Image (cartoon, grey):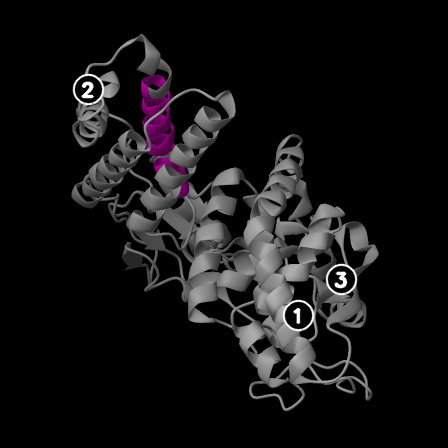
Amino acid sequence: MLMPFPAPRAFRSCTASDLLWHGVAIVVCLLAGSLLGWYSDRFWVIGADSYGMVGLIVFSYIGSALSSRRGLSFAKTDLLTTAFVSILFWFLLTSAVLVLSKRYFSRTYLLGAFMVALLWQALQLRLQKPNRYRLALIPGGLADALPGLGSIDWQILDTPRFVQVEAVMKDPYHTSDPQWRRFVAEQSLRGIPMLHVAAVYEGLTGRVSLEHHSEAFLEGWRLPVLYPHIKRLTDICAVLLSLPLGLPLMLLVALLVRLDSKGSVLFWQERVGQGGTSFRMVKFRTMGVDAEKEGSRFARSNDDRITRVGRISRKFRLDELPQFWNVLHGEMSIIGPRREQAGFAEQFSKQIPLYPYRHMVKPGLTGWAQVHHGYAAGADETTEKLTYDLYYMKHLSLWLDMLIVFKTLKTIFTGFGAR
């Protein structure tokens, strides 16, 4: 029986020393807040009026520590990013609870606790080395693409022979030789797990192998029951909270678009959404008014159809700000696969296996594929982006969405993948 792949970035199970480390960290977080807020005796000596805030800080630290471990189970994540995103999320949640409850609290106290928690957990992740697996690899098929990936001691087996490893990996589609089949059976009798190379490839690259999931993808995946509703509520709150900053920015971009070239400020186009249904997506116009008079086509690097303002707004994703309307309307989410033009979606559905499955979730302003691959122009690049989209769907969760948000901010500041 093929076993699931244990993420190579996952750490050992929690030990007594880990509990002691985090216990000391919680005490230091509370003391740091008191030291920074020494001028307020309400927080230097913990009293009845501060129990609520202190309890929330303890809760936030524990939640962030657990979330960091969960975040490291995803592919293409690093230690510091995971710790920062996790701690920031939980302390922002604590701040929101304190503000909504209208209880008195110290912002200095919260800031001090946040900084100590970040430094403490980052130090622990640096000192505590992740597992380095020793894996045996039976050559053939997708297995040939694995050597060199990840911090793994690869043992490539040229002939069936016994090696001391944690697991043996094989591609069932290319392991039909009787000698290898007998070898696999012998390893199983020794208690050595058998890993599917597709699962290992997915855990190391953040992508799904289309070849190995063409028949079984839907059998092992179902849309979570509760999280889509949480995600919808989060989308609405995020859009509404961003309006004080977003509206002035959108007005500025709209003015620049109007001054830069003739034509409408907004551009409406039919896109394919969840379930394959069509909707009208809105964005700021970035091309000339006659850009698609000869039909739709992918944007190229240095495309002469793009206006001066359009080139800047595309680079920093400012042209997509009006899509907050589509998010509020329920046609899109903030995070999901890229929304594709109806004509291209129909074309790719015929050319690329599994392509229609990306429509099982709402398209998004950003997503796992967008932050790792960027813009796709053509069937080949779209196929590669699909491998990221399917990974996102299989691992759909709050923790993965948090990582995507952080990576998106990095993408916006660097202009990665824009055309």
Total marks placed: 3
Residue beneath the point at 78% across and 60% down: 272
Residue beneath the point at 81% across and 84% down: 295
Residue beneath the point at 27% across and 29% down: 109
Q: Position of residue 393 (x, y in %)?
A: 60, 48
Q: Marks 2/3: CA distance?
A: 53 Å
Mark 2 or 1, nearer chain start: 2
Residue beneath the point at 29% across and 36% down: 111
Say whether residue 165 is left or right of residue 56: left
Q: Is residue 41 above or below residue 352?
A: above
Outermost residue, front direction?
39
Residue 300 found in image quarter: bottom right
Q: Is residue 338 visible?
A: no
The amino acid beneath tag 3 is: Met
Question: Pointer 2 and pointer 1: residues touching (CB < 8 Å)?
Answer: no
Magenta residues, as a range? 54-71
Q: How busy is the neighbourhood of tag 1: few (under 14 within 10 Å), some, or many (20 plus)?
A: some
To which residue does mark 3 refer?
A: 281
User: In this view of the protein, which residue sits in the foreground, 127 or 191?
Assistant: 127
Q: Marks 1/3: CA distance?
A: 17 Å
Tag 3, which secondary structure?
Answer: strand
